[in-house]
């Protein structure tokens, strides 16, 4: 059944940090949302680009050679194989597009930060 | 080179309607933006789902059995093979994700509404 997704409404359904939920799919991609705060770990995704769209707050996307500040209404695409470390001071709401099955921690599949069973909301 | 894209800034770069521009790519997808106003034509995309994110205005997405109003901060995914007709009363700004090479008019490749050579902005 085709229906729309209201992102702001979906963000009201949970409050834990660094725990992506799935809100949709597009071909072989999942559309996920997450609330992030503080620092994540350095990682990369070998097999898929990863898109971040910020809807609230500021995402500091650390790359090995620079840091890019991404605010509401801005997107950033991290190409496959590029190391990155997301960080947010205060809560930041993000929408992510990445291939189904992609682990949030990339090559660190056994990290304590890994979320492998994602819930649809 | 990895960099961010500010959607609002990109929308200031053109003003014609129903003429998508490419602002990014993610695996085999293009990320496009467009200003739409009035009615488009019924069409479908056989080989790719298509995602619409509204950033300003209201998109009336007509399906054969219903119409869904999509406003700012809302997304809708049209599955491959599903007929749809976008419409907007007043200007509406949309972001689209679809497979590279997808024609805006779907199976109507020779329509006067078809835009086949899209510009990167």
Image (tube, coloured by chain):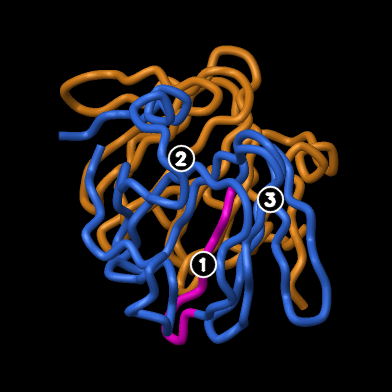
Chain colours: A orange, B blue
Viewer can see residue B21:
yes
Sequence-earlier tag: 1 or 3: 1
At label 3, counting other C-alpha atoms closer than 10 Å, the crowd grade (few under 14, some 14-19, many 20 or more) is many
Under circle 3, the secondary element is strand
Q: Chain of mark 2?
A: A
Query: Which of the two residues, B57 or B30, is positioned nearer the viewer here?
Result: B57
In the picture, residue A95 is in which quadrant?
top right
Residue A49 image offset from top left, x and y in percent = 32, 54
Do marks 1 and 2 share a subunit? Answer: no
Q: Residue at x 60, y 23 (%)?
A: A37
Cα–Cα gap, marks 1 and 3: 14 Å
In this rendering, the label closer to the viewer, 3 or 2: 3
Left or right? Give the position of B74 relative to A58: right
Q: Residue at x 40, y 22 (%)?
A: B9
Do marks 1 and 3 share a subunit? Answer: yes
Residue B17 image offset from top left, x and y in percent = 46, 45
Residue that carries the numbered disc 2 in the rendered image:
A52
Left or right? Give the position of B107 relative to B93: left
Under circle 2, the secondary element is strand
Cα–Cα gap, marks 1 and 2: 18 Å
Residue that carries the numbered disc 3 in the rendered image:
B59
Q: Quadrant of the N terminus of chain A?
A: bottom right
Q: Chain of mark 1?
A: B
In the picture, residue B23 is in which quadrant?
top left
In this rendering, the label closer to the viewer, 1 or 3: 3
In this rendering, the label closer to the viewer, 1 or 2: 1
Q: Which residues are magenta?
A: B45-53
Viewer can see residue A112:
no
């Amino acid at each position: 059944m085709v229906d729309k997704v209201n992102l702001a409404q979906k963000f009201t359904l949970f409050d834990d940090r660094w725990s992506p939920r799935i809100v949709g799919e597009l071909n072989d991609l999942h559309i996920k949302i997450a609330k992030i705060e503080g620092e994540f770990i350095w990682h990369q995704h070998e097999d898929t680009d990863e898109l971040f769209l910020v809807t609230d707050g500021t995402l500091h996307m650390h790359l090995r050679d620079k840091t890019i500040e991404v605010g509401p209404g801005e997107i950033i695409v991290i190409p496959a194989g590029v190391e990155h470390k997301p960080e947010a001071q205060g809560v930041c709401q993000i929408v992510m597009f990445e291939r189904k099955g992609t682990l949030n921690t990339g090559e660190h599949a056994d990290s304590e930060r890994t979320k492998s069973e994602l819930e649809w909301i």
